Image (cartoon, helix red, strand yellow):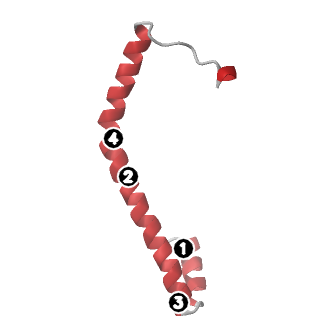
Amino acid sequence: MTKLLEQAIAQVKQLPETEQDAIAALILEELEDEAHWEKIFAKSHDVLAELATAALAENQAGKTQELDPQTL
C-alpha cells in the first residue's frame, strides 16, 4: 500500500461510520466504473483498427477533404 493511500485511510478511519461508508461506496463505484471502461476499450480495439483502415483507404482514394477549423 502506498504512503498516500495509508494516509487517506488513516484520515477516513477518524470519520463517523456513515461517512466512512459513503467514501467506501464512492471508491468502489469508481473502481467498478474503471473496470467497465477497460473492458469496453479492450473489446473495441478491432473495431477501431477497422475504422482507421477504412479512413486511410478513403483518404488515399481522394474521398476526403482537408479540415478547415474556420468552418467548424
The picture places residue 31, in percent across and down from the top left corner, at: 43, 65
Which residue is identified by label 3? 18
Quadrant of image for the C terminus: top right
Secondary structure at badge 3 equals helix
Instruction: State the residue position of label 4.
Output: 44
Q: CA distance from mark 4 to mark 2?
A: 10 Å
Q: Is residue 53 left or right of residue 68?
A: left
Between discs 2 and 1, the one toward the N terminus: 1
> Marks 3 and 2: which is nearer the front?
3
**Which class describes the residues within 10 Å of circle 2: few (<14), some (14-19), or many (20+)?**
few
| Residue on which disc 2 sits | 38
- The amino acid beneath tag 2 is Glu
Q: Is residue 23 above or below residue 70?
A: below
Q: Which residue is mark 1?
A: 5
In the rendered structure, are the residues bearing label 4 and label 1 in contact, judged by CB atoms less than 8 Å apart? no
The first of marks 3 and 1 along the sequence is: 1
